[in-house]
Amino acid sequence: TSCPSFWANGRYVGPAAIVQAHRFIFDSRDRGAEERLALLAQRWGVWRCRTIFNCVDACPRGIDVTRAIEEVKREILKRSL
């Protein structure tokens, strides 16, 4: 991975896992969104992302990884209100 947050601590779930979860969280057919969001809201989840954008530059599929992570962060905050 190209993520410095992951290099600093391997417990961080990392950008690839968050993007994979994002795919399901925002799919209306997914029944596990609450569980996924709860896991990503934990200490080693989305809040470890420092928006450095290395993942965006390194992604071979051209996915805007940082945008996906920010969307998950917003969804966690929205559901916690």
Image (cartoon, rainbow, N blue to C red):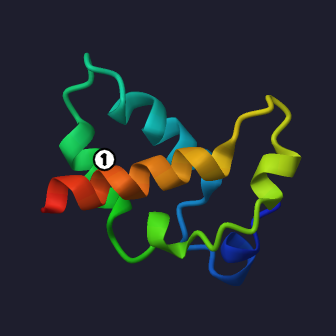
Asked whether, in this view, residue 74 is left or right of residue 52, the answer is left
Query: Which image quadrant is residue 52 in?
Result: bottom right
In the image, residue 58 above or below residue 20: below
Horizontal side of 61 relative to 38 (left or right) equals: right
Residue type at mark 1: give it: Arg
In the image, taking residue 18 as reference, residue 36 lies left or right, namely left
The outermost residue toward the bottom is: 8
Instruction: Tell which residue pokes out farthest to the left in this image.
Output: 81
Q: Nearer the viewer, residue 75 or 37?
A: 75
Asked if residue 20 shows in the view, the reply is yes
* Quadrant holding the C terminus: bottom left
* Badge 1: residue crowd in 10 Å (few <14, some 14–19, many ≥20): some
x, y (%) of residue 75? 31, 50
Disc 1: which residue:
36
The quarter of the rendered structure image containing the N terminus is: bottom right
Residue at screen point 55% across, 42% down? 19
Q: Is residue 24 above or below residue 66?
A: above
Residue drawn at point x = 67 percent, y = 75 percent: 5
The part of the image, by quadrant, that contains residue 38 is bottom left
Kindly identify the residue that appears in the image at 25 percent across and 38 percent down. 33
Residue 79, percent from left and from top: 18, 53
For image coordinates 70% across by 83% down, the residue present is: 8
Q: Residue furthest top?
A: 29
Where residue 47 sits: x, y (%)? 46, 72
Q: Is residue 79 left or right of residue 50?
A: left
Q: Quadrant of residue 28?
A: top left
Of helix, strand and loop, which one carries label 1? helix
